[in-house]
Amino acid sequence: MTGNAFTFQTLHPDTIMDALFEQGIRVDSGLTPLNSYENRVYQFQDEERRRYVVKFYRPERWSAEQIREEHEFALDLRRDDVPVAAPLAFHQQTLLTHDGFYFAVFPSVGGRQFEADNLEQMEWVGRYLGRLHQTGSKKRFTHRPDIGVKEYLLEPRQLFETTALIPAGLKDEFLRAVDKLIEAVMAQWHNRFNLLRLHGDCHAGNILWRDGPMFVDLDDARNGPAVQDLWMLLHGDKAEQRMQLEMIVEAYEEFCGFNTAELGLIEPLRAMRLVYYLAWIIRRWDDPAFPKNFPWLSSEDHWRKQTSIFLEQVNVLQEPPLSLTPMY
C-alpha cells in the first residue's frame, strides 16, 4: 500500500475510541474533527471534562523515528518555555499505536486565531520565533529531511509528467512553466545557510493567540534556513512586507541572531512551496477527502492559472530580493 493510495477508510470512530481507551482515556463527548487534510485530528472531552486533541498520522508519510523527532522537538521547546502544543506521554511514550496507525494525544490548548494584520501580535511572534530557533539550533534532526530542491521541485516535476490529472492539451505548456521556475530557483538556491530544526509550516493558521502566541502542528518540521519560519508571515505589497519583516527580525534578534543573507531565499522558498503544494494534492488524490475539498484540480482553468502563477513567480525571482532598511 502506498502513501498515495492510502485513505483513512478504516479509521472509524470505534477505532479511535478503542485506541484512546487502551491509554486509559474514556471519551465523554463526541469526536469533533479539526481542520487537517494530511492527518486525521479530533478534539474531545474525557469523563473528567478535560479537553484533548488526538492526532492519527497518515501511514507511510513519516517513519516512527521521524515522528518521535517531531515530538522530541516539541518537548524541547516546552522545556525552554516556548509556547507550543506538545504531545502527552503514556507509559513514557508519546508515539502510540493502534490497529496499524501511529497516533498521539495532545492537551487541547484553545485560543483565538493569530491576527496577521496586528503588528503587536506579529512582534510577539517574531520574539517567540527567535526563542523557537534558539532551541532548534541546539541540534539537528537526524531522521527528518532537510528542505531542498529535490523534495520540493524535482520530485514534483516527475509527478507532474506522469499524472493524468493535468489535461493533456495543457500539460506541455504547464511543464515548460515548471521547468522555467525550477531553473530560476536553482540559479538562486544555495546551501550556504545554517541548518536548524524549524517549525517548517509557520503560517498564520498554525499560530493561536492566548495572551501571546501558541505554535501548533509541527508535522512539517524539518532542518532548514531560519527564514523559512519567517517569510510565510509576510503579506501585502513590498513596502508592507518590508515593514513587517523589520519588526519580526528586530524582535527575533532579542533571542537569536538572524543571517540577513537568507532574505534572498524568500522567493525561492515561495516558489518551492507553490510547486510542492500542488504535488501534495495530486499525491493524495486517492483519499476521498481531496477530490471533495479540492474539486478545482480537474478544471482546465485551474491548470491555466497555475501555469500563469508559475511564470509570474519566475519574473519575481528576477527582481531584487526583499531587504531590510539599513540602520545608521
Image (spheres, helix red, strand yellow):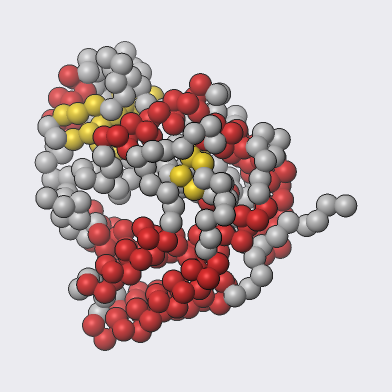
Residue 145 seen from this side: yes
Q: Residue furthest right?
A: 328
Q: Nearer the viewer, residue 190 or 123?
A: 190
Res. 114 image quadrant? top right
Q: Is residue 258 left or right of residue 297?
A: right
Q: Is residue 225 above or below residue 21?
A: below
Identify the residue at horizontal 46%, vertical 37% (top origin): 140
Nearer to the camera, 7 or 65: 65
- Residue at the spot 24% in from the left edge and 43% down from the top edge: 58
Q: Residue at x 78, y 57 (%)?
A: 325
Vertical comparison of 37 with 306: above or below: above
Q: Picture coordinates of residue 303 (x, y %)?
A: 34, 76
- Residue 301 visible in rendering: no
Task: Point out residue 74 in the picture as x, y percentages from the top left corner.
Answer: 44, 30
Relative placement, left or right, of 175 versus 213 is left
Q: Position of residue 97 (x, y in %)?
A: 19, 28
